[in-house]
Amino acid sequence: MVRIWSEFFNSASAGQLTADTTKRCLARQAAGTGRLRGHRLIQHWCRHLGGIIALRTYWRSAVVITDPFLLQEFFAAERAGAFEKPSVSGGFKDKVTGRAPEKGLFSEHTAHPLWKTVRKGVAPAFQPANLRVFHHHIVDIMQQLIAAIKEKGPGADIDMSDVGQRESFDTIGRVGFDFDFGTSRTLSEAAAATFADSSGKDVFQTFGLTLSESFKRVSNPLRRFMFFSPDVRRGTEAMQRTQDMARALLAHVQAGSPEPRSVAAHLLALRDPTRPGDTPLADARLQSELLTFFLAGSETTGHTIAWTMFLLGKHPEAMARLEAELDAAGLLVTPERPQPRTFTYADISKLPWLDACVKESMRLQPVAHAGLRRVATRDVAFSSGLRIPKGTTVLGSQLSLMSDPAWGWKDPDAFKPGYSPWIWQHPGAFKPERFSDADTEYLVLGPDGVSPTGAKAPAANEGSAKADNKAKRFTPFGNGIRNCVGQQLAMSNVPTAVAMLTAEFKMTLSPEILDKSIQDLEITRGTLQPKGAIPMRCVPRSSSLRRPS
Ligand code: HEM
């Protein structure tokens, strides 16, 4: 988010500014929030000003909605076509070569026939029946990483951010495209020879550079014209190499016969409704879709693994309880059991503390921290009286939705926005136990059926057939028709990685980051991610190496 300098207001009707609230906000900002970066500032503002705020960045106005009931109405309106993804270009894909932008599943308009075709077409690839079959890939990748960590020597400091990125990149490669990039076989050095080019950079490094360059371009659109800067030239080259990689991978899957349940096979089987006859998707579109899955699927999952390991390291009592759960399930390496049984897909649903730790990490550090950005395609009226005029940008704030006490979260913070970063370490900060109650994921309204912003539960809405006084307040994967298509893969990947690392190593935060707050370690570059390394000391519970299959 660009730096917010301006006025905003707390009103049920978007489109007005009041001098009074402007003053209040500026006063609050002066009182201690000045050091907060955009995403935390918005979290702070939402908490102090309520479930609907309007804000203006340098030249744009937007409404941020965090009331779960209002969001429920918002997602229903989106389903009815009242909100669309903004008309951005095809992202980093088109910025590379200047060709006509080719959108992908993430950026395509909901109203466009190709969005529905691709969404419906690839969804089966992410169903549990498929993920069960593919789970051995994730275990195999984790065993490679574990072997690589052990090779660093006993008690080495390992960057969990790097581990997460390698794991998730290889997982998309193998589960999605039936291709082994092999980035997990080594750590902190060039790994995958496949598709590597004369630059000496492997695909994984190139992809990282591409992501970084594309986000720099989002915040500075003029950057693409700065040919004279060596940094920009490096970024542009990386983007070109990423396109080459996507082309090569596409040619590889087209030439072979990818595993029929993979994303690749589903994409190749699709027919393009915008072209005459029984025509498959054009290569440019397939290439764009392929990159979308690497972009949307690898980074997000990798950072979630890193944040979960960091939060467990910060909360040894939660880590100890996880170790005990893995031990009871026969999965923890112990002196008596140096070769425990292999983690399976079925284990994921049988380890409630593991599940709770992952969810609590996603609540506190949602990598998709904003979660949504939409534009109203027409004037929209909400049950609270809120009117959103056509053309208004609507933003979400997952950080607020998943931590604001106004939505019923108790003891919700990893740190208190606006105050000393040290306060985040107070004992209640990381509370996986809240997820032992399935209703934790919902805000339940009182008997009047009216939310704090005046939104009415469906039961109280005139003409509503569905009587329901609860709305989702835990939505790390978004909500509505544009929610995350790959969430089941992520929820199979992250717990497997966290469990296998914990089973194999006694893990503690490296002294380097022991006293750091999450605020010190985080940055937003599209996603909420570690600013640098998350080093953790990994002491093997056994010296024996379990070689990957
Ligand atoms: C922890 C990991 C992940 C998180 C937190 C996450 C989060 C999200 C969120 C919040 C959205 C909705 C954005 C919006 O409303 O505009 C989304 C969409 C999407 N995600 Fe994920 N995601 C994760 C993993 C994955 C994986 C593993 C894949 C696929 C391999 C994936 C592919 C996608 C795609 C293609 C979309 C766009 C769907 C559409 O617009 O129809 N994501 N994700």
Image: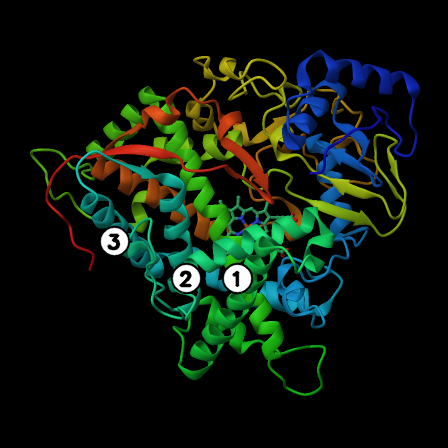
Using the numbered discs, state the Cα–Cα distance from disc 3 to disc 1 in whole angstroms.
26 Å
Residue 382 location, quadrant: top right
Q: Earlier in the sequence, mark 2 or mark 3?
A: 3
| Residue 253 visible in the displayed image | yes
Disc 3 versus disc 1: nearer the observer: 1
Q: Earlier in the sequence, mark 3 or mark 1?
A: 3
Using the numbered discs, state the Cα–Cα distance from disc 2 to disc 3 in whole angstroms.
21 Å
**Residue 299: x and y, percent?**
49, 49
Q: How many marks?
A: 3
Using the numbered discs, state the Cα–Cα distance from disc 1 to disc 2 in whole angstroms.
9 Å
Q: Name the secondary structure under disc 3.
A: helix
In the depicted view, which residue is nearer to us: 442 or 203? 203
Q: Residues within 10 Å of mark 3 (few under 14, many from 20)?
A: many
- Is residue 425 toward the left or the right of residue 114 in the image? left
Disc 2 versus disc 3: nearer the observer: 2
| Residue 485 visible in the displayed image | no
Relative to 84, is 339 above or below? above
Q: Residues within 10 Å of mark 2 (few under 14, many from 20)?
A: some
Seen at 61% across and 31% down, the residue is 399
Q: Residue furthest left?
A: 336
- What type is the residue that disc 2 sits on? Lys
For label 1, being within 8 Å of ligand 1 is answered: no
Pointer 3: what residue? 144
Pointer 2: what residue? 201
Seen at 73% across and 18% down, the residue is 29
Task: Determine contact: label 1, label 2, CB under 8 Å.
Answer: yes
Pointer 1: what residue? 238
Q: Earlier in the sequence, mark 1 or mark 2?
A: 2
- What type is the residue that disc 3 sits on? Gln
- What type is the residue that disc 1 sits on? Ala
Seen at 80% across and 18% down, the residue is 26
